[in-house]
Amino acid sequence: MPIPESELILNRDGSVYHLNLVPDHISDTIITVGDPERVPLISQHFDSIETQIHKREFVTHVGYYQGKRLTVISTGMGTDNIDILLNELDALVNIDFVTREARPLEERISLRIVRVGTSGALQPDIPIGSHLVTEHGVGLDSLMQFYPLVETGLEVEVATGVQQALQLPYRPYCVRGSDLLREQLGAGMVVGNTLTCPGFYGPQGRVLRLDLRLPDLIQQFQQFRYHSAEGEFRLTNFEMETAGYYALGRMLGHEVVSLNAIVANRATGEFATNAEEVVNDLIQKTLDRI
Ligand code: R1P
Ligand code: URA
């Protein structure tokens, strides 16, 4: 059955609704960033840029880095944008925009998607200025209330443990990212488990003028441990997208990894004075390894 026009919305030029891209803009490997201004920080390293497109917070540059074709896209903040990004990226490679039919299962294309973002460490031993590759994403946001995500036994147990520790009224979701990409791109980085929050302030335990419903949230997250045959699981850092990427990546069949420039430490109260440098170093490392 063709997918109706109201569900897969195409612009007049044939591009997909929010990303404003056509299938030819998509390389096998895609670098994604939150901040639209981070896109040119990446593409400035390209040998050549063939396309620059933007719509809303989605800025895309397509070009070549040392002969390899790369697409870089900004997403803005939050897993609601990651829902749009992953569904539209997948449509660009796995749905025929003329017939509006999905590719047969055996012909599905799997993309490599690399998030290069900023993040705040939760544990005192993870210094600002370090780079962290996410093994598991734990989602405190509501995105997975709407999809039938299948989690492993360990993932369910970790998520249930987080729910109990924080006495949350709902169970978070927990998803392991691509082992392949973590090994390829994350060599030498801190390996961590990232808490994806539906906000920057209250959901990450920041107090400005508002009290929190969970005043000891940071301590509870810091102290959370889960022991299994695989060893000790602890939560390492806060940000706002990773778990959404990992969950939708698994369901759609794409390899996804999240690389985090640690710009704050919530245990020590520090913020990096050289945050731009920490991000630029992560960009260079990512390009060198991709
Ligand atoms: C908050 O400042 C933003 O920074 C982090 C969070 O996930 C959130 O999007 O990532 P980016 O630097 O990639 O945007
Ligand atoms: N991004 C976040 O979401 N949290 C931080 O503390 C730093 C960057």
Image (cartoon, grey):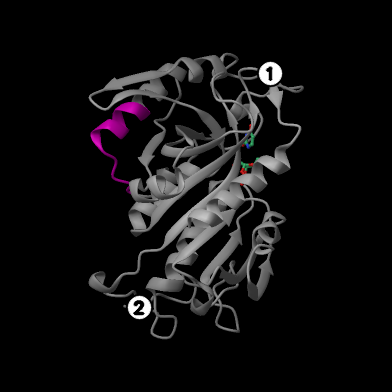
Amino acid type, callout 1: Asp
Amino acid type, callout 2: Glu
Is residue 269 found left or right of 153 in the rendered image? right
Label 1, ligand 2: CB separation under 8 Å: no
Measured along the vertical axis of the image, is residue 182 above or below residue 221?
A: below
Q: Nearer the viewer, residue 277 or 222?
A: 277
Is residue 116 found left or right of 182 in the rendered image? right
Occupied quadrant, residue 144: top left
Q: Position of residue 287 (x, y in %)?
A: 55, 56
Q: What range is drawn magenta here?
A: 148-159
Label 1 secondary element: loop
Q: Mark 1 points at which residue?
A: 211
Q: Position of residue 231 (x, y in %)?
A: 29, 23
Is residue 14 found left or right of 163 in the rendered image? right
Q: Which residue is drawn at 50% across and 72% down?
A: 26
Q: Which residue is drawn at 31% across and 34% down?
A: 155
Q: Mark 2 points at which residue?
A: 101
Is residue 17 found left or right of 103 in the rendered image? right
Q: Residues within 10 Å of mark 1 (few under 14, many from 20)?
A: few
Q: Could you tell me how many numbered marks the image carries?
A: 2
Q: Residue at x 60, y 26 (%)?
A: 127
Q: Nearer the N terminus, badge 2 or badge 1?
A: 2
Q: How far apart are marks 2 and 1 (CA)?
A: 50 Å
Q: Can residue 81 be seen in this view?
A: yes
Q: Where is residue 264 in the image (x, y as percent from the top left)?
A: 66, 29
Measured along the vertical axis of the image, is residue 252 above or below residue 50?
A: above
Q: Which mark is residue 162?
A: none
